[in-house]
Image (spheres, grey):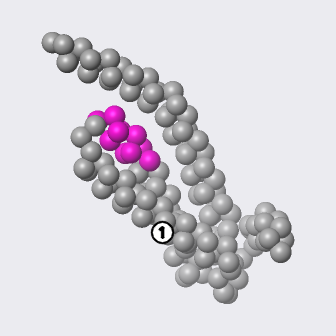
Amino acid sequence: MKSALFTHLFSATYLFGPPAAQFSKSDRIFSVLAVALLAAAIACEISKHFSKNELYKDIVHRWASLFWTIGILGMLWFAARYEFIALFSMHIVAAVVYLAALIWAIVLVKYYFTGYKRKREEFAKQQIKQKYL
């Protein structure tokens, strides 16, 4: 049953065909995912507001931007799906939005392990210098 649902998500009829009159299970999953991303964006904004570490604020801001953008686009897709707007409510639109989110998240993880790590080490060295001045 699960494999049939998974293969159904990649069929041309599902991706490019007109949406059904009733919401499918995947439509509900996409909408819940969009709401969860918006909640994560709000949590990031709150966390960023109470933090005093500028490096932490930078990385959290990057993730919050991802969550806000994809959450809002996901909700817009769900609204188009609800209103039966033919072009925008196709499942390929949601697939492209969430694929873009995946690529964006991979870029952020890459940044975390390269650029952010280097900035954090430089910040630690600077803090040691400031301590003895």
- Above or below 120: residue 10: below
User: What residue lies at 25% left-to-right and 50% top-to-bottom?
Assistant: 49
Residue found at the very far left of the displayed protein: 133
Q: Identity of the amino acid at label 1?
A: Val
Q: Nearer the viewer, residue 124 or 96?
A: 124
Instruction: Point out the image quarter for the C terminus.
Output: top left
In-image side of 126 versus 33 (left or right) = left
Task: Tell me if residue 59 is in the magenta stretch.
Answer: yes
Q: Quadrant of residue 62?
A: top left
Q: Which quadrant of the figure has residue 2?
A: bottom right
Tell me which secondary structure the magenta stretch mostly adopts: helix
Above or below — where is 133 with respect to 41?
above
Residue 8 in sight from this viewpoint: no
Please report the bounds of the magenta region as a residue range.
54-63
Q: Position of residue 130 (x, y in %)?
A: 20, 17
* Front-lying residue, 109 or 76: 109
Does residue 101 sit above or below 33 in this rendering?
Answer: above
Residue 105 location in percent, x, y? 55, 45
Q: Position of residue 56 (x, y in %)?
A: 35, 39
Q: Is residue 57 visible?
A: yes
- Badge 1 marks a residue whose secondary structure is helix
**Would residue 9 appear left or right of 124 to someone viewing this image?**
right
